[in-house]
Image (spheres, helix red, strand yellow):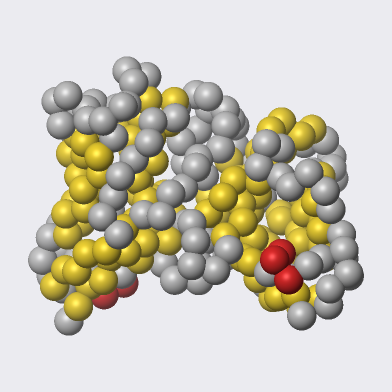
Amino acid sequence: DAKTTQPPSMDCAEGRAANLPCNHSTISGNEYVYWYRQIHSQGPQYIIHGLKNNETNEMASLIITEDRKSSTLILPHATLRDTAVYYCIVRVRDSGYALNFGKGTSLLVTP
Amino acid sequence: NAGVMQNPRHLVRRRGQEARLRCSPMKGHSHVYWYRQLPEEGLKFMVYLQKENIIDESGMPKERFSAEFPKEGPSILRIQQVVRGDSAAYFCASSPTSKRWELFFGEGSRLTVL
C-alpha cells in the first residue's frame, strides 16, 4: 500500500469548512483513498473513499488531484462533534486485507 | 441492526494472567478484523478472520496471542500470560465480505495489566 503523509494537527472554527490534506505521491493506479475518523475513546468510523473522481456523501467531500498524488477531505460545516483524529489510507480496494492506519491528523473544532 | 459488540469494555489483569476479548460482528457479517491501539499511537492491524478460518495474522505477535472465529458465537482474541506492554485498546471490526471498503468498528476493549 502507498504511504500517506498528513499534518499531525489542525484547528478549525465551528461552522467553518475543515480542509484536511493528505499526500500520497506513490499511489498506484488501482489504489483507492479512504478516510476514517476516530473520536476520542471510540472505534474508528468510515467517512468516504474515492479512486480519481471527487466524491461527496452526507458526511464529507473528497477532492483528489488530477495526478492523484494528494487529496483533501472537506467537512463543509464543522461542528464540535467533528473533533477527532482523521486517517487517510491508501490501499487496493479488493485486496481483501485490512486497512493500515497511520498517525492521522488530530482536528480540533473550536467554538 | 445492532453494531459490532465488544466485551468486556474494560478488563484489568495482573501480569501472568490470561485475557479474553470477545467480538460479535454485525448481523450478516462474516469477516472480522482485530486491531490494537497502544496509548498515544495509531491502530495496528493484528488479524483477519472469516468463520472458522484465519486469513491473515501478519500483525499478531508470535507468542501468547491467538484468535478464533468459530462457526457459532463471537470471535475471541486471547492473550496468555499478559505483560504490562499488552495494556492497550483492542478494537474489532467487521464487514459483510472481504471486498468492501467500509469496516464497521466496535467501541473497543480496554485492557489494563497491573
**Image coords of residue A57 (percent x, y):** 26, 45
**Image coords of residue A106 (percent x, y):** 32, 64
Q: Is residue A30 left or right of residue A62?
A: right
| Residue sitting at x 50%, y 42% | A100
**Image coords of residue B34 (percent x, y):** 65, 49
Of the pair A25 and A61, the residue shown nearer to us: A25
| Residue sitting at x 81%, y 58% | B79
Q: Is residue A53 above or below residue B60?
A: above
Q: Is residue B48 left or right of residue A107?
A: right
Of the pair A48 and B65, the residue shown nearer to us: B65
For residue B97, say whether it is visible. Answer: yes
**Image coords of residue B76 (percent x, y):** 79, 53
Q: Quadrant of the N terminus of chain B?
A: bottom right
For residue B27, say whether it is visible. Answer: no
Name of the residue lying farthest toward the top: A29
Within the image, what quadrant is residue A84 found in?
A: bottom left
Q: How many marks?
A: 0
| Residue sitting at x 50%, y 24% | A94
